Image (cartoon, coloured by chain):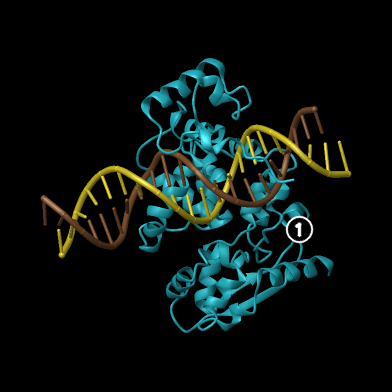
Chain colours: A cyan, B brown, C yellow
Amino acid sequence: MGRAPCCDKANVKRGPWSPDEDAALKSYVETHGTGGNWIALPRKAGLRRCGKSCRLRWLNYLRPDIKHGGFTEEEDNIICSFYSQMGSRWSVIASQLPGRTDNDVKNYWNTKLKKKLMAGKVTLKTMSDNLSTLDSTPSLPVGQRAQTHNLAFPAGQTQSYSRQSILTDANSGFNKTESLSLDPVQLYGLAFVDGSEFGETSRNNHINVSMSQEGSSISDSSSCALDKKYLSLPENSEAEAIEDLMDFGFGFHYDLVNGLYSQDKAADAAPCYPELADLTYDDIQLQGLNQNLI
DNA sequence: AACCGGGCCAACCGCCAGTTC
DNA sequence: GGAACTGGCGGTTGGCCCGGT
């Protein structure tokens, strides 16, 4: 049996919210709360809207602590830093930016920040820079980060990272993690490459792609030696090479090195990067599993 | 003035995971 | 144990706005 729709689409209003609807929703939620049931809320509030739509409207626009307006440079840096570590986990990134929603961050990234980054107006922080930023930024003390992550990832949900392979050269970051009391998400972030790896790229003309264990076992894997697989890049500059890969839809190095590109994408890139055509997500997963078995 | 294209962003869609019964 | 249901998430879309021609 298929899943029942969350609402009767024929009888709900769609499209932009009117001021009256906003007022009705705001008034209801402020008076009664959500009652833990968004699906039933629109009926109780006298709205002809889908419950999901109400939830989204409240969370992204009507909530009193929402911050409207442009992003600051500090916010830019935080977004870039976290994106480089964990990719498009917009809810996690937004949780680091008080008053910002995942939708805001996602839109901002897709429309502006990515272009700023490519234009060199913003730089991806190295992991060590990131650590120092986080540890020195009053709004992001280590303890608070852990608290935020606990909210974002209740017990047991760390498994949601399991499909993402972790990239590391097995030397970067882990020493620091031992001195910090980190939750799995933080450890996950620390396991990723930092800018120095691109420095290495520019020196030996390789992107260093390491296969590692599943995210769910990160906490046990800090000392594991990780096999490496090298992808040769054409004889152009590092920036050009990365930009070319992005043109193929690979996204940032996070996406490339974590195997989060599809076989189709690899095939698209094959004329220029034949090595990529043979490297599928399944290959990477298999390689990672093999490493676990050794 | 009319048209066009790009930027921006609110809203929707579909999927997944957790919870309830 | 499994079906039904809900919340949450990331990706995508559609429409408005604005500047250029």
For image coordinates 55% across by 55% down, the residue present is: A87
Observer-nearest of A265 and A84: A265
For image coordinates 63% across by 61% down, the residue present is: A172
Q: Of helix, strand and loop, which one carries label 1?
A: loop
Residue A88 in view (yes/no)? no
Provide residue A32's location: percent of width, then percent of height.
56, 16
Reply above or below: B17 against A8.
Answer: below
Point out the image quarter for the N terminus of chain A: top right
Can you identify the residue that label 1 sits on?
A221
Provide residue A163's location: percent of width, then percent of height.
69, 58
Q: Is residue A62 left or right of residue A216?
A: left
Q: Residues within 10 Å of mark 1 (few under 14, many from 20)?
A: some
- Amino acid carrying label 1: it is Ser
Observer-nearest of A134 and B6: B6
Provide residue A255's location: percent of width, then percent of height.
57, 63
Observer-nearest of A3 and A199: A3
Point out the image quarter for the C terminus of chain A: bottom right
Q: Is residue A165 left or right of residue A50?
A: right
